[in-house]
Amino acid sequence: MMQIKEIRAEDTWQLRRDVMWPQQSINYVQLPEDKSGQHFGLYLSGELVSVVSLFVAGQRAQFRKLATLPRHQGKGYGTALLHHLLKEASAQGITQLWCNARQEKAEFYKRFGLQETSHTFRKGGKDYVVMEGSVATPEAAASTAE
């Protein structure tokens, strides 16, 4: 059974590290703003398999550190979690959303209406692109989740 719920920042760290930066220490994936963010986890039969964090600044927000355990990737769990985040953002009055996407994942984020900007950078040997887009109304977000 799949369940998505809000979790504590520290509940995201191990999964973030294991998926995104397995060669780094746990401190590498801890963000200074984690304490002020909202964090969501997707559980399968009680096991945390996907996480994402949301950082709000007025009507604009950034989501960061979307990570799904490798054995569960490609099964729609990241998609379900991102749809949940979009609904939460919309309910909070957020109108603009952005992220730093790994270049090879840009197509995934385009499915959620995010567009690549001209801002790119490299971190830890990986290429990133800043992506941004509008947050749909709760009704529109619900219809795209189906």
Image (cartoon, rainbow, N blue to C red):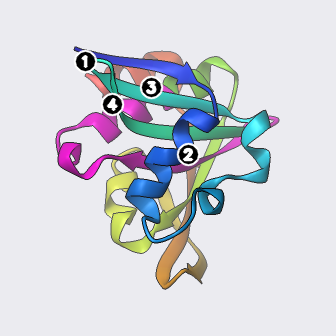
Magenta-highlighted residues:
56-85
Q: Is residue 63 above or below residue 37?
A: below
Q: Disc 1 or disc 4, which is closer to the eye?
A: 1
Occupied quadrant, residue 46: top left
Q: Which numbered marker is on residue 45?
A: 1
Q: Disc 2 or disc 3, which is closer to the eye?
A: 2
Q: Secondary structure at mark 2?
A: helix
- Quickly name the residue at label 4: 80
> Amino acid under label 3?
His
Q: Residue at left 21%, top 42%?
A: 72
- Mark 4 to mark 2 CA distance (whole Å): 20 Å
- Mark 3 and 4 residues: CB-CB less than 8 Å, in contact? yes
Q: Residue at left 69%, top 42%?
A: 61
| Observer-nearest of 76 and 107 | 76
Q: Secondary structure at mark 4?
A: helix
> Amino acid under label 1?
Ser
> For this view, does 109 lie left or right of residue 124?
left
- Quickly name the residue at label 3: 84
Among numbered discs 1 and 3, the one appearing first in the sequence: 1
- Quickly name the residue at label 2: 13
> Amino acid under label 4?
Ala
- Mark 2 to mark 1 CA distance (whole Å): 20 Å
Placement of the N terminus among the 4 image quadrants:
top left
